[in-house]
Every structure is written in structure tokens, then in C-alpha cells.
Image (cartoon, rainbow, N blue to C red):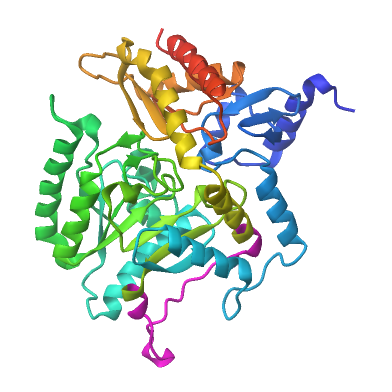
Amino acid sequence: MTDPANRNAALAARDLKHIWHPCTQMHDHETVPLLPIVRGEGAWLIDAEGKRYLDGISSWWTNLFGHANPRIAAALSEQARALEHVIFAGFTHPPAIELAEQLVSITPPGLDKVFFADNGSAAIEVALKMSFHYWLNQGHGEKTRFIALTGSYHGETLGALSVSDVALYRKTYAPLLLTPILAPSPDAYEGEPGETPAQVAARRLTELRALLERHAHETCAVIVEPLVQCAGGMRMYHPDYLAGLRRLCDEFAVHFIADEIAVGFGRTGTLFACEQAAISPDFMCLSKGLTGGTLPLAAVLTTRHVYDAFYAEYSAGKAFLHSHSYTGNPLACSTALATLAIFRDEPVLERNRALAAHLARRLEPLRTHPHVAEVRQTGMIAAVELVEDKASRRPFAAGDRRGLRVYLHGLEHGALLRPLGNVIYFMPPYVVSEAEIDHLVAVAVAGIGRAVT
């Protein structure tokens, strides 16, 4: 029998014998602990030896209403006793029908058609292919390219990676990828001295216009992460950019793809980030929080106008022949319905605004830290930019791995903080309490102190 004091080590050893983990240099686990989690309660994760970790990143930005949420678990259990899965070509089922109806009712106006997939990268693939195929069906086969923002990240399948601009993920596979047209990001952090976020957005829209003037004839769509470029370092920008982007897409006849996979379902302060610019994209990609972090599921919403470009006799060859085995999975759809029911029945966004304000107050002292260039926040997403020199914003050398020091300090003190390079960020589940936010920030502050010395 395994010694209770060594259960983590025993499970980690079994894991490392066979499992290759994502986004990980496996050699790191010779010194960095691999933590076996056996249970979750609310905002906390619990390892095999009973130690608790406050989930400050919502388990890769998926968890909304806490681990092992009883309402979502009950919906999953009930559905599992009725129907676990059925082919979604030529068949349908009530959870998918109801979920599509509800998604159409809560997303921006005009998004009337729902195509299901099973993860965020797959949703991006669907949107890219659907946009290209729309133009092909309309007789514009010359439109084969996409415009993305510098610093963008949309996933790690080849299509999604093709419209991403984070070198860490893209560089190795560049020979396999499409070449996007990169538009300068409206990231407010990169603004000129004294420039407001709205002014940065306006300047970047002028530059985007110039790109469209040259490339609109060959461009299918512009794809963006609305308001927050997450994996690119939690870069944040003004909603004016989205409003201007919508106008430019209309003027130059290109699609607008909104990747709300990470920022949707209340993360930015509104149910969807696009709401803050009062715009509707041509495609909206959703995943992560869609099921409250319970099961993989994604959805791409688009317009009837796009749908109609594919609607023809079979012999016309216009059908969108894209599929995943678990498309529209009933279990996943049922957990999504339970998640949406919580939004409907509880004052989630109001509560989030209070929690976001508390988080902002707790992070305020870091603004004067000698190694913090910026503290930025959009709703329930906050980030702290660590730098070697505050005045010049000179970053720490990537090889120093200062963020890893914060991560390890967090684990030692009961907090899951998984920085993006030297950006320490906070994206906790919505069930977090103010006291838990206090704990999270206190651990992060201490970890930052440890990391920069």
C-alpha cells in the first residue's frame, strides 16, 4: 500500500512512465513537481495528499462556476442515463437543439446558425474554412488569405496556428502553415507615451485600413480575440477597435471572425466581449467556458446570409463537409445548458463586477513595484507585466524564467498561478470569494518578490 505521505510522488511516477503532457518540456519534471489532482471543490483543487490549491487560472480559463459544480454534475448524470452520444449527421437530439436556441438568443444579433465542434482550435478551423468556402461558393476563389493581429493566438491545430502570431507556438511549425497578413495589434501597452487606449485603437484602425486597401481582394476574413489577446500575454485594447473593425469589414467586403473562446461567457465584464462595442461579427467562436469547464465543446455561430451560400442541391457541390465524431455530443450540450441556466438564474455578471473591483484594489499597490511595468485588467482578467527595468520597460531575459519562479512559489503556498512568460495573470472561477482573491494576490505578490531578486 502506498504511504499516504507519498501518494503524489507515486502517482506522478506512474504518469511520467507513459504520459506526454501538453505545452510542457517534459524534462522540466525532473525538478518541477507534477501534481496529481484527485478532487475539486469550488475554486480549489485538491491533490492526492490533501493539499489544496486555489485555481487562479480556472484550469486553462475553462472553469466558471467551480470544480465539481453540483448543478452541472447533476445535468451530466441525468443525460448520461438517457443518451451519451449519437452521430450528428442525419440525427439530432434535444440538448443540442435547446443549446443552439439559447446560444442564438444570447449572442449578438444576427448570429442565427450554430455549427458544433469539440474544442476551441476546432472552432477556429470551422470558421476559417467556412469563411473561405463562403467566398468560393460566391464565385470569389481568389480570396484565400486571412488578416490576424500581431501577438494573436487562436489555437494549435495547423489552421488555427496559421492565424496566430506567438512565436513560441508558431515558429517550429512555420513551414507547414498558411502565411497570414498581420495587422498591428491595438494593444494599449504598446501605445506611444501619453497615448490613450482609444487613441491607440484609432491609430491601429488607420493601419488596418491601409492593409485592407492592398489586400481585401484576396482576404477572406479578419480574425481577432475581442478586447484581450490572452495567450499573447493578456494584452488588452479599447472596444473602439472592434467597432471600427466591423465598419472596415463591411466597407471592404471581408468577414469578421470573433474568437471569444477565452473571453466569452462573462470574462470581460459582459457576457460576450463584442457587446462592449455593440457589434455583431460574421462568425463567433465559443468554447472553454461554454460547459463551465466540465466537458469539451465548441460552437461557431454565423449568419443566415453565410448559411444561405451553402444551401443548394447536393449536385451543386456547395455543402460544408466538415465533421468531428463527437459533434454536438449530448453530454457536453447538457452541461452547457446547465451552465447557461446558472447565468440565467443568478446575478453572475453583477457579482463578477464586484469581484473584479476587489481584485483591482488588491493589485493596485503593484503599480509602483520597481519591476512591474503595468497592471492591466478587463473584467475578471487581470495581468501584471514583470520587467527588468521599469523606466524603459526592458523585459527580463526569457531564459531567466522569472514567471516559473512565481508558479513554484504559488504551488508551495496553495495557489495555482501559471504565468505567460513574465506576465503574471489572474483569471479565477466566478465562485471565488474576496478572501480567496486576497490569498491569491498575496501569494502572487510574495512570488513576484521572490522572482525578481
Instruction: Give the x, y percent position of residue 51.
Output: 70, 22
What residue appears at the point 40 percent right and 92 percent down from the top-left corner?
Answer: 315
What residue appears at the point 50 percent right and 62 percent down from the top-left corner?
Answer: 102
Considering the whole magenta stretch, tell me its main secondary structure: loop
What residue appears at the point 40 percent right and 28 percent down from the top-left corner?
Answer: 421
Total tally of numbered discs in the picture: 0
What residue appears at the point 30 percent right and 46 percent down from the top-left corner?
Answer: 276
Q: Decide if residue 437 is on the left or right side of residue 361.
A: right
- Residue 96's place in the image compared with 357, above or below, is below
- Residue 22's place in the image compared with 87, above or below, is above
Q: Quadrant of residue 329?
A: bottom right
Front residue (pair 201, 26) = 201
Q: Quadrant of residue 34?
A: top right
- Residue 237's place in the image compared with 424, above or below, is below
Image quadrant holding the C terminus, namely top left
What is the magenta range?
306-332
Q: Decide if residue 447 is on the left or right side of residue 160.
A: right
Instruction: Give the x, y percent position of residue 402.
Output: 42, 19
Q: Decide if residue 279 is on the left or right side of residue 328.
A: left
Image quadrant holding the N terminus, namely top right
Q: In the rendered structure, does residue 336 fall within the stretch colored magenta?
A: no
Q: In the rendered structure, does residue 322 fall within the stretch colored magenta?
A: yes
Q: Residue furthest right?
A: 1
Front residue (pair 439, 278) = 278
Q: Decide if residue 5 is on the left or right side of residue 227.
A: right
Q: Quadrant of residue 44?
A: top right
Instruction: Give the x, y percent position of residue 439.
Output: 55, 18
Q: Residue furthest top?
A: 453
